[in-house]
Image (cartoon, rainbow, N blue to C red):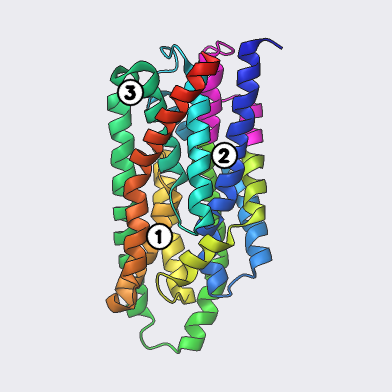
Amino acid sequence: MDYTMSLVVVIVVLALGFDFINGFHDTANAIATSVSTRALTPRRAIILASVMNLVGAIMFTGVAKTIGGKITDPFKLEHGLTVVIATLIAAIAWNLITWWYGIPSSSSHAIIGALAGAAIASEGWDGINYGGFTTIIKWLILSPIIAFVLGYCIMFILKRVFAHSSPHHVNKVFRYGQVLTAAFQSFTHGTNDAQKAMGIITLALVTAKIQPDLDIPLWVKLSAALSMALGTSVGGWKIIKTMGTKIFKIEPINGFSADLASASVILSATLSHFPVSTTHAITSSILGVGSAKKFSSVKWSMAGRIIMTWVITIPVVGVLATLIYYLLSLFLD
């Protein structure tokens, strides 16, 4: 095995590791509300999330192409394989740190910030495709705002519709509904998040001149989908606790509204070929639903802590990837 192929193998292993960690790191996005309201047992929720993540991951490739070609140009990277390795190490490190402390940070922000930082370290500021990168950032900013508003609107409407119904009846109806929305949320998570690793692997294949374009090979789709599904099956209970209990006390109608809002935003982004943060979408929709229920019921201090993590992720991981790139370049370039 020659040197270039050895680096590609390392990248594939790291990318699948990132997908696995993304799976258990972001399990909470799909099942936190349904577990916290006891619409699903933890075991059934994780099985459902794993299966639907897998199905969603193998059905789309548009986001993968965006990750592979919109942030930096893989055809112009002189040290592309080193850039990709630095990107993955930085993103994995950030995911593990935030998982350990139970903070629902964004794997999407981590991988995008890391790739931008490593590309700048390698090629200077010309290493960034500003048009594509700016558009991605706009989607990352707008998607949680839309999820918040949509969650608020759905909860506001349902609260009016069921205003005179007994709480027992409402809870019973929406516990069943949550099974469907948890499946929908898990499916959309797979359609968007699993593609990020697919895009990174394909970027490496193009940089190594193993393939001529950004079309996603079948083996890349299947391996990334399976890695994320396997990671989802492990679960991320610290983040589930944060999402399901520490923002506000979620009831079945709230969980249904939040899942429906966030999944709709994520699927819209996937169909538009843009990566968004599933973490941001579900957390923002929970905040919107909580605000519609009762503004004072939301624990805004916890929300502020989560939002601060969102804000710092891209620059912090970008700097981390830059430092890792410089260190790796002493040995790999």
Counting other residues with Cα less than 10 Å from the Cα at mark 2, is it few (<14), some (14-19), or many (20 or more)? many
For the residues labelled 3 and 1, the Cα–Cα distance comes to: 29 Å
Nearest the eye: 99 or 193: 99
Residue drawn 46% across the image and 69% down it: 255
Q: Residue at x 53, y 40 (%)?
A: 92
Residue 178 in the figure: left or right of residue 3: left
Which numbered dot is residue 283? 1
* Amino acid marked by disc 2: Phe
* 197 displayed left or right of 72: right
From this viewpoint, is residue 307 visible? yes
Q: 312 and 180: which one is in front? A: 312
Q: Nearer the viewer, residue 330 or 181?
A: 330
Mark 3 or mark 1: which comes first in sequence? 3
Label 2 SS: helix
What's drawn in magenta, residue-wise? Answer: 197-224
Q: Position of residue 264 (x, y in %)?
A: 42, 53
Pointer 3 with pointer 1, Cβ within 8 A: no
Q: Where residue 317 sits: x, y (%)?
A: 40, 38
Is 177 in the magenta?
A: no
- Is residue 219 in the magenta section? yes
Is 272 situated left or right of 188 in this image?
left
For the residues carrying marks 1 and 2, which lies nearer the camera in this image? 2
Percent coordinates x, y for residue 50 in the rendering: 64, 52
SS under mark 1 = helix
- Residue in the picture at 46% in, 87% down: 167
Q: CA distance from mark 1 to mark 2?
A: 21 Å
Q: Amino acid at mark 1?
A: Thr
The disc, 3 or 2, on the residue closer to the chain's N-terminal end is 2
